[in-house]
Image: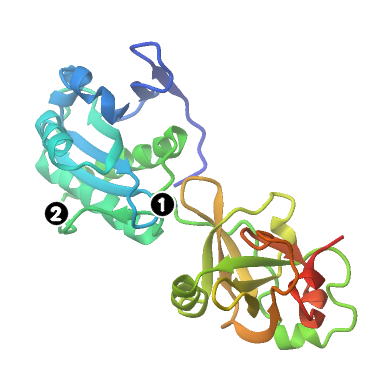
Amino acid sequence: MTSDGFSIRIYVPDGDPHGVRIIDRMASTGLAITFPRSHWPKIKSRPEFDRTGVYILSGYTGEDSDLPTLYIGQGDGLRDRIESHFAAKEFWDWGFAFVTKSNDSGFNRAHITWLEHMLIARARRADRSHLNNGNTPSEPTLSEADKADTRLFLKEILQVLPLVGLRAFEIPVPVATPNAAMTTGAAASVPGKSLGEADTIIVPAQRDGFEAVFLGQNAWHAIRIGGGMIPKIKYVAAYQSQPVKAVTHVAPVASIEPYGEDGKYKLVFAEAARPIGPIPFADAPSGSMQGPRYTTYARLLNAKKVTDLFLK
C-alpha cells in the first residue's frame, strides 16, 4: 500500500462505539460494516447485506490465544452467508463486511472471488492469524481494467482493517533489527560488552514450546516488551520451567516484529540458540521466573544461579 492520506466517516447507528460501525472511506469503491457477533440477529436485515462483497469473521480459539482465527468469504449478497456461519461457526466474535456502495456497481462473482483469493493469500503471507478456510480459491481471470478497479477495492479494505482493530493482514515489519552479523561467540569476546544497561531478555518456556519454537523455529513469540526496551534487546535466553528449572540457551536477536493483535512481539534469531550454563533457579524467590526478565549479556555469561541475573 502507498502512504497516501485518506479520510473516513464512521457512523454508529445505535450510538454504541463498541457495537455496529459503518465506515465510509471518502471517494471509495465500497463500504465497511463492523459488528459484534451478538449484534448479528438485529442488524442482518440492513440493506447493505444485500450487496456484493467480501467478509471476514474473527475470533480466538484454544489453538493460540495470541493469534486470531479468521474465516474469509464472499457472496453476491452477504446476509445468507453470514447467517449460515452464525449458526455453524462458533469461534468468531466480530464480523467485518466490505460491500459495494450500490447494487449496480458492476462487481460480479469474478471480482469478489478475486478479492477473496487475495485476502486469503495476504493472510497466509502475513502469518498473523489461523485461517478457518479449508481451501484457497484459484485466482479468477479479470481484464486489466477490472483488475485495476478490484485492486483499488482491496487497497481500501487493507487500509480500513487496522483502523477497526484487525492487523492480521499487515505484513510484519520489524520494529528493531539488532546487529545480526555479530554472533554470540563474537559478542562474548568483546571486552566489557553488556556490562551496563540490560540488553538481554530471559523468557520462561515450557518443554514443548522450547523444543518446537525456541530450538525448532529459531524464534520466540507472544512476548510483551516495554517500548523503551525494544531498541536495547540484543539477545534472548530461555529459562526452562519444570522439571529443568534453569536458564539453558541463548541466541542473538536478528529482528523484533509485531505478533498478534494485542501489543506482543516475536523475536527472530540471527542464528540457532546455543547451550549455556545451565543457570539453576536455586534460591530465587518463588514465581520470579514466571514472566520475562531483563539482564545483561555479561551477567548471563557469568551467572552461577538465577538471582545473579537480576538487575539491582
Left or right of 65: which side holds 44?
A: left
Q: Is residue 289 above or below residue 145?
A: below
Amino acid type, mark 1: Ser
Residue at figure coordinates x 40%, y 15% from the top left? 16
Q: Earlier in the sequence, mark 1 or mark 2?
A: 1
Residue annotated with mark 2: 140
Residue at figure coordinates x 44%, y 50% from the top left? 170
Left or right of 44: which side holds 230?
A: right
Please state the total of marks drawn on the protein image: 2
Rendered image: mark on residue 278? none
Give percent across and percent down for residue 232. 75, 61
Residue annotated with mark 1: 65
Give percent across and percent down for residue 292. 65, 60
Regarding residue 293, the answer to whether it shows in the image is: yes
In depth, the one of 23 and 206 nearer the eye is: 206
Instruction: State the SS at label 1.
Output: loop
In depth, the one of 220 and 109 nearer the eye is: 220
Density class for disc 2 (Cα within 10 Å; few <14, some 14-19, many ≥20) is few
Instruction: State the SS at label 2.
Output: loop
The image quadrant of residue 248 is bottom right
Left or right of 14: which side holds 149?
A: left
Q: CA distance from mark 1 to mark 2?
A: 34 Å
Give percent across and percent down for residue 286. 68, 61
Residue at figure coordinates x 44%, y 52% from the top left? 66
Amino acid type, mark 2: Pro
Q: Is residue 104 above or below residue 133?
A: above
Q: Quadrant of the C terminus?
A: bottom right
Q: Check whether the beta carbons of the residues at disc 1 and disc 2 lie within 8 A of each other.
A: no
Regarding residue 250, the answer to whether it shows in the image is: no
